[in-house]
Amino acid sequence: MVCLAVWYFITNAVENLMARRIASGFGFLGREAGFEIGESTFLTYNASDIYLKALAVGLLNTFRVAALAIFFSTIIGVAIGLARLSPNWLLMKLAAAYVEVIRNVPLVVQLFFWYAVITESLPAPANALNPVPGVFLSNRGLAFPVVAAIFPVALEYPALTGFNFSGGAMLSPEFAALFLGLALYTAAFIGEIVRAGILSVERGQFEAARSLGLSEAQVMRFIILPQALRVIVPPLTSQYLNCAKNSSLAVAIGYPDLVSIANTTINQTGQAIEGIAIIMFVYLTISLAISAFMNGYNQRIALRGAKA
Amino acid sequence: MIDNKITAAPFPSALHWLRAHLFSNWSSSLATLSLLYLALKFVPALLDWALVRAVWSPHNAALCREVAGQGACWAFVADKYRFILFGTFPADQQWRPSVAIAILLALYALSALQILRRSHVVRIWLVGLTAIGVVMWGGIFGLSYVENERWGGLTLTLLLSTFGIALAFPLSILLALGRRSHMTLVRWLSIGYIELIRGVPLISVLFMASVMLPLFLPQGVSIDKLLRAQLAMILFAAAYLAEVVRGGLQAIPRQQEEAALALGHGYWQRAWYVTLPQALNIALPPLVNTFIGFFKDTSLVVIIGLFDFLMTIKVSLTEPAWTGFGVEAYLFAALGYFVFCYPMSRYCQKLERRAAPGRGIGRFSQD
């Protein structure tokens, strides 16, 4: 029955494609893309490059934002998890409020919010905020100096020319909003995982270590965390996966990630099946890679002889 | 000492509390003081912006521009609230989506209170959802027909999430049973489906429904955008729910199934009367959690251009009078989602505590 249904859908698709004169196959990847991309990591791209390169730029943009968001959300998340277990009532309540607010508001809304904060509340480049010398925060994003030469060490500073900055490096408002939103959102979930992991360690362990004369920090480092990690790692893996998948919301605020560029490609070529197949293939690969990596790590920290 | 404790005056006990909870050692004191310093520095300015200098009355976009940066512009919400609640539903008929929302809230409340037998709950949901369909579409009982392109706002968000879960649920039970089936083909199809859907972002499933689905239908047949999105949401939710149901099924001791088998019950009888009722009971807290996630996920239909709660706010912002008030608008959107999600998450925590007494009392927590 399933086979019949699949066959029925495929014949429909073939008929429709013929009727609309849409080509099939991945030949379009070698043709000229013809659209500009706002920002690019590592690769230099212009509109006369081919679709394949445009998609590669999108993929690298996805990697850049997902990797940074995963890294920072882990740091913030651990801090939030520890704060929720703090003996300080104020700190504990504050962390709890953070978790409740962030978890009960959709990520897209948070992304729109941060994007609005950056583009509407920050000043224009001419009166950019200048918290540290050489770093400028404006509604065009964050401009900061980069190392132009290693020997002798030379920094290239951003400078205001016309309506925007040139020189140095620039983080776009789209990237900043997506990164901020993703990191803060994922951190709230990681905070809860860290908290549950630490709570899963028996109280006696803590008391025994303290009575042996270890300081609170040492107890945390050598006794609690190694045991808590066994509980923390599996759900942490799925949070990392979620973060990578959630980076696809970039399309909502116009950051040129893989989904956004594949979407443009679909609109231009009409080859929806191929475009969506590429998106799904890439995300499935990322998902499998992250879970393989984390499974390996999990086996390393698991109890010897225990079933991983 | 004991007497002292019982008759302790409120003032010393308050001091004790402060000392134990805010100033127990130097690091805790430092944290308290720095948090208080930050609060003093930022909270008054925030309240000044959000409440004192804010513009509240509708039709006051000009005043909003004057105080921009110093006072919040809630006039935006006051002006656009009908559009945000009901989308472009005909103005004289807007009592109908109101009734639909009321029915939905009543259904949620009835299910959450758990005062009815499970079979009754199923029947009441069927009746309720049918009533909502009648009220929204109309066309009978003297109600004028309203095509679903005109549904929108908060109503649409609630409908998408409720119908999505209600229809995904039976499918997810089949998938969960399929994943544990002894028939190899059924098992592999279920696993493949669940893992495929869970491995890709919801956006790609929504894109698939909005641009790819029309290609797979016979020529001349078309499904409108709302139903396509709803279908995508159902297919997506079913995969996640299936894993939750499977978790519940795994928690049932095998003897339950064996005992039912020994009594001569067939496969479906065993599932329907023995394993599923127990499994769903166990899986109730994670089911509610999945529902919260799904409710939030409905906001993604913005990307394919449906007029849900978030989209009506986003579109209102593009009107010349209201451009540049995104911060206020999205704070309001956040509040809107929070009002629905927070009670659900509290309810879920209550269910969890009831399911596992003793757990959830923290080792490091206060009592």
Image (cartoon, rainbow, N blue to C red):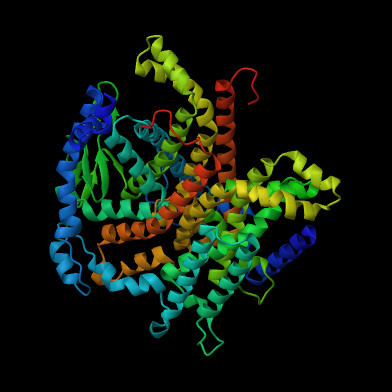
The residue located at (42%, 54%) in the rendering is: B343
- Find the residue positioned furthest to the top: A212
* Relative side of B209 to A148, left or right: right
Image position, residue A51 (x, y; %): 52, 52
The image quadrant of residue A18 is bottom right
User: How many discs mark residues in the rendered view?
Assistant: 0
* Relative side of A40 to B290, left or right: left
Quick check: B133 above or below B169? below
- Find the residue positioned furthest to the bottom: B142
- Residue A178 shows up from this direction: no
- Residue B217 shows up from this direction: yes
Q: In this view of the protein, which residue sits in the foreground, A102 or B1? A: B1
Image position, residue B94 (x, y; %): 41, 80
Quick one: quadrant of the N terminus of chain B? Answer: top left
Quick check: B283 above or below B151? above
The residue located at (42%, 80%) in the rendering is: B95
Q: In this view of the protein, which residue sits in the foreground, A272 or B330? A: B330
Image position, residue A233 (x, y; %): 52, 30
The residue located at (26%, 50%) in the rendering is: A140
* Relative side of A75 to B67, left or right: right
Q: In this view of the protein, which residue sits in the foreground, A131 or A234? A: A234
Quick check: A64 above or below B308? above
Quick one: quadrant of the C terminus of chain B? Answer: top left
Image position, residue B282 (x, y; %): 61, 46
